[in-house]
Amino acid sequence: MPELPKGKHPFFLLPERSVTMNAVTGSNSQIVLRYREVGSGNPILFLHDFSNSAYTFRHLIHPLSSRYRLFLPELLDPTGSQTLPDMNYRPERLAEFVLQICQALEISRPLLVAQREVGLAAILTALFSPEKIRAVVAMSVPITLSRGSRLKGFFLRPKLISQLWAKQRFKRPQMAAMAFLQYEDPQCYCRQEIRQLSYPWSNWPSAKARAQIFSQSLHPGYREEFFQKIMEQVSPNRPFPIPLKLVYGKSDRRTPAEQGENLNRLLPGSELVVAEHCAGSMHVEDPEWTAKIITTTMKD
């Protein structure tokens, strides 16, 4: 396995910065948010899902940084140097957290680019505070879960089971990183990638917190709360208040494009875009195409 990735990108060349912010609104508990920043112009805030880090957006840096100011925060501490806050990671709570990030980084009306479960939070953020968000690009947002995912969420709910699952990852963080990479191009594998993606599982407190997050996000109640909030905010007479693009991969087995069609019907005013040649990680498989979608949304 090579040390450096075959596809060149500037992610590791960007200095990692940090800012201290409250873990929960109105709480004295604080966390250190790590992030990378590059470019100038209108801001774009990238929000990775719980299985990844900001590194997943590495191939979008080059095509977008010449025109926009990019922010790539680590929603979960990638170094494992701090214990993650014991907070509710469901969509409505994460929507508040997204606004806290904007405030901490002093970002005004960013375009949100979010994937999978965190895409639910980005959509709610725009619904609750459309004056604070320019637009949203939500990629591969799952509105229903496979039977296997539902079972995993069910079994991870008991504290003992979630701890045992976390200990597995804690003992083999590199294997966990390889499991997350299996949906991307194997040609991209390198030692730097494995190190970056194994950090969150490399110590016990961080692995335990991740297990708690997965037990929430894989539980059906996670989606039920989301759709309840959606139904309170939108209707055919009240379309989505800002530009929203729902992006799905045609060959994505984890989140089929049919789910995007259902979400598109649920959100009047949204636009569905299907990557005919991608299997779900379009920002990795075809970053130039994804960058064009983001640029078009920014202009909308």
Image: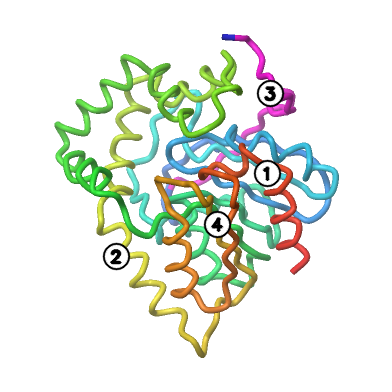
Q: Secondary structure at mark 1?
A: strand
Front residue of this view, candidates 77 and 189: 189
Q: What distance separates the C-alpha of mark 3 from that of mark 2? A: 38 Å
Residue at 77 percent of width and 47 percent of height:
69
Residue 154 location, x and y as percent?
18, 45
Q: Which residue, given by chain and number where applicable, does mark 3 sit on?
A: 12
**Precedes in sequence: disc 3 or disc 2:** 3
Q: Tag 4 or tag 1, which sits nearer the N-term?
A: 1
Span colored in magenta: 2-23
Q: Secondary structure at mark 3?
A: helix
Q: Considering depth in this image, is 260 or 174 the residue closer to the camera?
A: 260
Q: Position of residue 282 (x, y in %)?
A: 60, 44
Instruction: Verify CB contact (< 8 Å) between mark 4 and mark 2.
Output: no
88 shown above or below 198: below
Task: Looking at the image, tell me whether mark 4 or mark 2 is earlier in sequence order.
Answer: 4
Q: Which residue is mark 1?
A: 71
Give SS at disc 4: strand
**Where does label 2 land, which residue?**
224
- On screen, residue 256 above or below 84: below
Q: Is residue 207 left or right of residue 249?
A: left
Residue at 21 percent of width and 29 percent of height: 163
Query: How far is the residue under mark 1 from the one under mark 2?
Result: 30 Å
Amino acid type, mark 4: Ala
Q: Which mark is residue 138?
A: 4
The quadrant holding residue 21 is: top right
Residue 10 falls inside the magenta stretch:
yes
Question: Residue 60, image x and y in percent?
Answer: 70, 40
Seen at 44% across and 30% down, the residue is 180
Looking at the picture, tell me which residue is in the foreground, 61 or 274. Answer: 274
Residue type, label 3: Phe
- In which quadrant is the C terminus drawn? bottom right
